[in-house]
Amino acid sequence: MLSPRWSKVFADVWSNKTRTALVVLSIAVGVFAVGMVAGTNAILAREVVAAYMAVNPADASLYPDAFDDELVYVVRDMPGVKEAAASRSISVRLQTGPDQWRDMTVFAVPDFDDIRINQLRPFAGAYPPRDREVLFERSSLPLAPGKRIGDSVTVELPDGRRRELRIAGTVYTPNLPPAALFNNTYTYVTFETLEWLGAGPGYTELSITVEGDRLDKRHITEVAKRVRDKVEAGGRTVYFTWIPEPATHPADSAIRPLLLLLGVLGTFSLFASGFLVVNTIAALLTQQVRQIGMMKAIGARRLDIFLMYLATVLLFGLLALAVAAPLAYAGAAGLATLLGDLMNTILTSYALPAEVWLLMAAIALLVPLVAALQPVFAGVSVTVREAVSGYGLGRGRFGRGWLDRLLERVRFLSRPLLLALRNTFRRKGRLALTLATLTLSGVIFIAVISVRDSMLLTLDDAIKYFNYDVQISFSRPYRVEQIARVARSLPGVTAAESWGFSSVRRVRPDDTESDSYTMIAPPADARMIVPTVLAGRWLVAGDERAVVVNTSVTRKEPDVAVGSTLTLTIDGRESDWRVVGVVRGIGDQAILYANYPFFARETRLAGRAAFGIVQIQPNDPASQRRMAALLEERFEREGMQVSQTQTIASIREQNEVSFNIIVAFLLVMALLLAVVGGLGLMGTMSINVIERTREIGVMRAIGASDGQVLRIVLAEGVTIGVLSWALAAALALPLSKLLSDAVGFAFFQTALTYAYAPLGALIWLALVVVIAALASVLPARGATRLTVREVLAYE
């Protein structure tokens, strides 16, 4: 048998199911948002690292002159080396359609049954491949449209020859960058097939794993140095050494900032949920003012009533936890799967660690208690006289403040609309909480749309400094005059230039080497590059050993800034360059710029270039694609081997895909906040109807129709919605700039070019009006269903 106080607690929860559902949803939304993001973080942190380490990724890779198995055996026996393996790869082009090609990396594996480092897992089809067959990495096969296991693909070799390879199957390995995100295709063949493709004998890559702590980059670096010294002592030159971040997936740097932003928005949802709890608990106390007075009249102490209502809040929190926890688990599993696919990782377990469940429990129980302290304290502080003398008119009064007096001068509205407008400002504290929730939702929504517009504007600004339409890369350098002459011979080409082009690597102060970066060397009077300089200056005529880097370089090399000296390896030779400027980059491509005259002397390519660019008219995307195909055909007819063509339109499309992924995740969280705002408004309207039950009865008694009462309640809700929109549209100006900057620095190491989104504000206006109308429907219908006798008898 329950005590009377506990009977009342359970009765309060059970008797008004609509109010209980509203409170539970209010709390559950915040628990769900935070739990989903925290759970996704926990799943990915565990699964991605486990999957990555399960294939035994290389701790370090060295790229020396061609070598054989004997060197591998020598390195395996070195102190500190746990395992060593050799491989070779070449870059080709994969045909994806008529005159359409995509970059493809072909890895040759000495023995598919004995892969010790960077292991492969058979996924579908046959394994291992036979001669003249190819295995696609599983995330790469979709980049070959229409191709399935058993089909043949055409590849073009660096010398222009073409070969047909049969797709034997697919393999899975999470140690490569995701194919779609990095716009590359990864495949595996036997060494016999690689030789048939034209590669020479021997290995070109030596991968090692180390004994001891594989998470200690300093230890790995020391072992790699000893291996390099050993290789060079044998008469071979080591051109570069690459040491990736230990136990870190290649796409980690792209995914982590996204999860951080989602976590911030989830925290906003939690704060908004707290506003909802304040309003909805206030609704319960407003309805039970007389009950509080009666309990005090028969001897209940303030502390007893205070604890009893806190117990009610705690019960609401437990119900919210029961609703939100499984939904948060499902959301975390779904989001982790989606992000895992983006990171090319198959998740094997979706179990959430205990700390995530404890976090959700703490949020569900503690946040509502904290949020409810003030309204509960205010509610139980009412005196017996105040409680028993109420007539359902509420404590709010209209006409006392300057805003009330201003509204009294409004005459052009109908009486129901005027009454709705005045009722809106009757309880200004409650209105402020409701506006805070809805305004926060609107600010985030408009800010997310503004971030998308800012990203596209930043992309436009970055692409502007590539003031051309089509770029052509050649398999070897050709005379500058010949490249320009052939390009200008095509109708529609208005200008052509030749730039130096090379792959370089940075030798860091600790003797490790970076991944391959691109160096582009335009002529001193180049017209087809208009960079966005963020620091320092652009190249000028006469610059020697001067280099400008883009923001992708500074992101990958955090110690690089204007004035830094970079040691670069170009064509196997090291040289020092001074950084004179930093320009905005496009996507993740790290580019360094140097003057062509000096670059040509340094690379012994005076008068020759391997990179051509053209301007065309018209220059729409279709014309760019058509001209790229014509240029490739014309150059090859002249005996000039083209390794790649790319249009500015395709560069934009590739980056838009990445941008849209970011925006899609942010927009989901923004819409979740919109749901929170709608629930908050529904709670406010429910409270207002409860407080004015007798007023509604009086209006009905003097002839107000159901339609008039319905319009008053709906108009009040829509008015609150429109007010929140006006506040959100104004506050979104500075706050969307902050979010835009945060996204820019998180993903691109520089602030985005900011653009406020008027369309986002208009979309939110439409959404908030719909949300306000829907949130007011239930309270409005409840008001119209009350009879005159019921409302006049209301206590």
Image: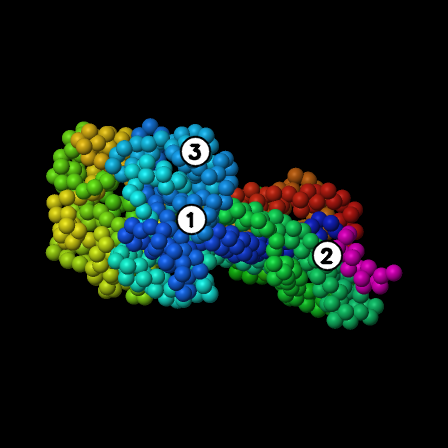
- Mark 2 Cα within 10 Å, few/some/many (few <14, many 20+)? some
State the residue at coordinates (25%, 58%): 235
Q: How many marks?
A: 3
Q: Indicate the position of residue 217 as horizontal and vertical percent values.
A: 41, 64
State the quadrant of the N terminus: bottom right
- In terms of sequence position, does the residue under pointer 3 or pointer 1 come before the other? 3
Q: Main secondary structure of the magenta part?
A: helix
Amino acid type, residue under disc 2 in the picture: Gln
Q: Which mark is residue 287?
A: 2
| First-in-chain label (1 vs 2) | 1
Q: CA distance from mark 3 to mark 1?
A: 20 Å
Q: Residues within 10 Å of mark 1 (few under 14, many from 20)?
A: some
Q: Is 14 in the magenta? A: yes
Amino acid carrying label 1: it is Leu
Is 436 one of the magenta-colored residues? no
Asked whether, in this view, residue 727 is left or right of residue 560, the answer is right
Spatial CA span between label 2 and label 3: 71 Å
User: Colour scheme used in the picture?
Assistant: rainbow
- Quadrant of residue 433 within the rendered picture: bottom right
Point out the image quarter for the C terminus: bottom right
10 Å crowding of disc 3: few (<14), some (14-19), many (20+): many
**Tag 3 near tag 1, CB within 8 Å:** no
Q: Depth check: 665 or 509 in front?
A: 509
Kindly identify the residue that appears in the image at 47 percent across and 54 percent down: 56
The residue sitting at 16% across, 37% down in the picture is 483
Name the residue beneath numbered marker 1: 176
**Is residue 449 or residue 599 the one in the foreground?**
599
Q: Please give the residue where the numbered disc 3 appears in the rendered image.
A: 167
Q: Which residues are magenta?
A: 1-15
